Amino acid sequence: MQQFTEHQIDGVVIVSAVGAVDMLTAPKLQEAIDAAVDRRPAGLIVDLTDVDFLGSAGMQVLVLTQRKVDGDAKFAVVADGPATSRPLKVTGLTDYVPLFSTLDVALADFAR
């Protein structure tokens, strides 16, 4: 099974991750996100719903992505639960990276 996949919904690119996003796998997530950003989508969502561990390297990828797309496209992260949303909230990253509990909620926000 592929750890990072991509699909589109209404012009928004969704990069989904599965398993652990740590110092070993974060570079692959960065590659997947960079490939999506290079195509200049209207919006980009990183879906961490199926992630069971989000390390500091994974969080750094999200911060770098926010900086890279700043103003060019909407950007959000979908994460819910102790393995993903909790570290994002505890570290204060949710002050910089929009966080949504489900993909549907994020897409609805993008449609506004």
Image: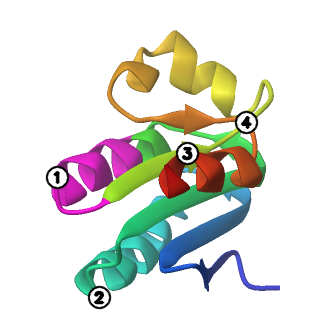
- Disc sitting over residue 101 in the figure: 4
Splitting the image into 4 quarters, where does residue 17 fall? Answer: bottom right
How far apart, in angstroms, are the residues tagged by discs 3 and 2?
21 Å
Mark 1 or mark 3, which is nearer the start of the sequence? 1
Q: Which residue is mark 2?
A: 39
Residue farthest to the front, as pictured: 112
Residue 54 shown left or right of residue 94 in the figure:
right
Secondary structure at numbered mark 3:
helix
64 inside magenta stretch: yes
Residue 44 x %, y %: 44, 64
The residue lying at 45 percent from left, 24 percent from top is: 94
- Does residue 23 appear anywhere in the picture? no
Residue 69 shown left or right of residue 42 in the figure:
left
* Quarter of the image that includes the N terminus: bottom right
Q: Which residue is mark 1?
A: 71
- Does residue 96 appear anywhere in the picture? yes
Q: Which residue is mark 3?
A: 109
15 inside magenta stretch: no
**Residue stretch rendered in magenta on the structure:** 60-73
**Circle 4 Cα neighbour tier, 10 Å, few/some/many (<14 / 14–19 / ≥20):** some
How far apart, in angstroms, are the residues tagged by discs 1 and 2?
15 Å
**Circle 2 Cα neighbour tier, 10 Å, few/some/many (<14 / 14–19 / ≥20):** few
Q: How is the image coloured?
A: rainbow
Q: Nearer the viewer, residue 67 or 23?
A: 67
Secondary structure at numbered mark 1:
loop
Q: Nearer the viewer, mark 3 or mark 1?
A: 3
Residue 46 x %, y %: 54, 58
Q: Amino acid at mark 2?
A: Arg
Q: Amino acid at mark 3?
A: Asp
Secondary structure at numbered mark 2:
loop
